[in-house]
Amino acid sequence: MDEGFEQVCEDHPEDAIELVIRARPRDIGGFAVRRALPSMRRRLVGPFIFFDHMGPADLPAGGGMDVRPHPHIALATITYLLDGVVFHRDSLGTAMAIRPGDVNWMIAGKGIVHSERTPPEARATGHRSHGLQAWVALRKEEEEIEPRFVHHPASSLPRIERQGVEVRLISGRAFGQEAPTPTLTPTIYADAKIAAGAVLEIPDGYEQRAAYVVSGSIECGDTASCARADEGTMLVFRPGARARVRATTDARVMVLGGAPIDGERFIWWNFVSSSKERLERAKLDWKEGRFPKVPGDEAEHIPLPER
């Protein structure tokens, strides 16, 4: 598929798939990512308004990721690593390393600043970096709540094993289990490893659902024209459809979605809001230094983009 490819499966309305999105490459300060959401044809899946696939990248000794302090409002960020380690600091005073299988869930609310960097020990030896960064839009009544940060180690997340399938439930209720993460709206997020030939049933208790292929290849439904997906592809399922995917090779798939958000959301840089006026105020606040500092990482910041 070409970069930026999107396909609506209009020829086969009986299929479970509504839309196929190919993630587009982006650079976030010297580190390559693939961005699936927002796309030109689909801005949200449930409350998920942003979805980046980071890496995999083999970082040499002396190299690393440096996402300098930057602000967010009216969203929650979800950091989930598959390989490597990232050190998170934020304006609440949080200073914590996240490792594969852990979840960092940061609710920005009325405003938070954070940085994400490769820690010195990993930078000294070199390492592989691979993970997912997602944003979840907050409901209008929660956009200005107090910011908070929650870390859940991998050992605290439910694991479900079925024939040829292993699922780690990051948020929501599915497969008879419930994750401990503090979602404010009905939200499903899960990491599924699927052996070649095995089938994953996509949980049906959520109105909007998607599956993103991290590695390997999957197929869905009976029509070959728009049912296959490989690495870097997101399948968006039709509401109410029975959705199931079969791995054609060993595959790793992120399942995401939830209840639709309450109204339109606007994105500008790192800001999300239901109000354009609120975005303008956030821009000015960052430009004029009114956001809080990040303890232990005060020397740098990402300037407000000119456009």
Image: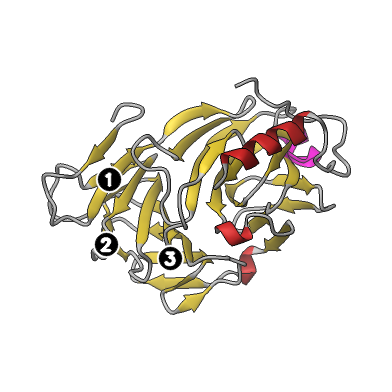
Residue 166, disc: 3
What kind of residue is marked 2?
Answer: Arg
Q: Secondary structure at mark 3?
A: strand
Disc with the residue nearer the chain's start (3 vs 1): 1
Q: Nearer the viewer, mark 2 or mark 1?
A: 1
Q: What's drawn in magenta, residue-wise?
A: 116-126
Is residue 244 visible from the viewing direction of this image?
A: yes
Q: Which residue is mark 1?
A: 19
| Nearer the observer, 140 or 164 | 140
Horizontal placement of 99 versus 119: left or right? left
What kind of residue is marked 3?
Answer: Glu
Residue that appears at 30% across and 26% down: 2
- Where is 251 relative to 55, above or below? below
Locate residue 116, reporting x and y percent.
71, 41
Residue that appears at 56% across and 49% down: 135
Quadrant in which the N terminus is drawn: top left
The residues bearing labels 3 and 1 have C-alpha atoms spaced at a distance of 26 Å
Q: Which residue is mark 2?
A: 244
